Amino acid sequence: MPEVIAPATRAAREPRHGVNTPALFATINAVKETPALAKFRFRATNRWISGTYSESRLETFTGAGGEHNHQTEFRYGADHPAVLVGEDRGPTPIEFLLHGLAACITAGVGNIAAARGVTLTSVESHVEGDIDLQGILGLSDRVRNGYERIRISVTIDGDAPPEKLRQIVEQSRARSAVFDVLTNGVPVDVSVNTR
Amino acid sequence: MPEVIAPATRAAREPRHGVNTPALFATINAVKETPALAKFRFRATNRWISGTYSESRLETFTGAGGEHNHQTEFRYGADHPAVLVGEDRGPTPIEFLLHGLAACITAGVGNIAAARGVTLTSVESHVEGDIDLQGILGLSDRVRNGYERIRISVTIDGDAPPEKLRQIVEQSRARSAVFDVLTNGVPVDVSVNTR
């Protein structure tokens, strides 16, 4: 059992607040025995509609040795707001990074708490990202295009002392896929095709 | 007029494929004169529901010297899929990064094409992110938590030669807020409160 998750206490072996903890442990052990199962590929397909508005579909992904479909086809729009000459038919693309960050840390908190025998009653996060649009508007070469800083504040409650609850959030941060990508960056290859 | 957008040709001064080009130029000029207008702060509020499922609201943001509400309150769920012991009630948090990337580059393509006097007929993107879950499962310290690599393939069509269309995508990439954050990273501060 990896230390990320829990000592294998009796409490940790029971399902808790929506987490099927035994299945989680079984999955971790299966991946431990067959590391190739851990290779995943996620995908999105985006289509421009008009102006700054586009829509993405999140449907299929590869992982655990096979192809998978999400239960539902998830579709999301994104746009620029009126103050940036868009039509506000969706959030700005960069706001989705804030949602991804909060949701990733929260999902980890759910799993880790259950695995440590802690029943949560609430987890709420507020995320803020500061950006100076002089970058993307091409008005300054000293201003970066993206967020200058992101802050996330997590408020957690459950049947454990405050210090244990804090450690659960800290462990989730330390193992968050989105936190890693946002703080460390990732190589992105761009290719262009013309019809 | 910043070179990012266009030479101020006659064609560039007309609205085009949903982009209000004159308003876009006016906004850029206003920010050029008053750089403080370019300071924006985007926000998300996330609430854990159960298991690995949570929901975010994207409602308000600060920018252009004021507070703004999106026209609609945008709500998004995120979850882990069944193969990762979630209930698949939403995409995984890290898939939202792929949507954000594609939507950001596409919005820029819409603006830049209009400003350069090019009318687009279609823009489609496919994005893939490769991730080895041994990282987040705590099974290997040599495997990072997040994506190892992201690829985006953009297919664009419009009333311009292929080379000009390619340059529009390249300019959008060069000024994309999400591309910058994903490739270069950003400082993220995490704070925890217990009730």
Image (spheres, coloured by chain):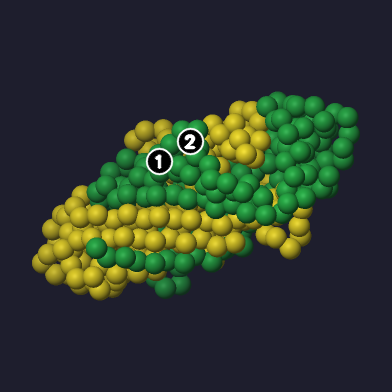
Chain colours: A yellow, B green
Task: In this rendered view, identify the residue nearer to me: B38 or A149.
Answer: B38
User: Counting other residues with Cα less than 10 Å from the Cα at mark 2, is it few (<14), some (14-19), or many (20 or more)?
Assistant: some
Q: Is residue B92 left or right of residue A132?
A: left
Query: Which residue does the numbered mark 1 point to in the structure image?
Result: B76
Q: What is the spatial separation of the Cα atoms under label 2 and label 1, in whole angstroms?
A: 9 Å
Q: Amino acid at mark 1?
A: Tyr
Residue B147 in view in this figure? no
- Residue A110 locus on image (x, y percent): 27, 57
The residue under the point 23% across, 60% down is: A157
Q: Amino acid at mark 2?
A: Tyr
Task: In this rendered view, identify the residue nearer to me: B37 or A35.
Answer: B37
Query: Which residue does the numbered mark 2 point to in the structure image?
Result: A76
The residue under the point 53% across, 42% down is: B68
Dot 2: chain letter:
A
The residue under the point 45% across, 42% down is: B59
Identify the secondary structure beneath mark 2.
strand
Query: Mark 2 and 1 residues: CB-CB less than 8 Å, in contact?
Result: yes
- Residue A137 locus on image (x, y percent): 72, 48
- Residue A11 locus on image (x, y percent): 12, 64
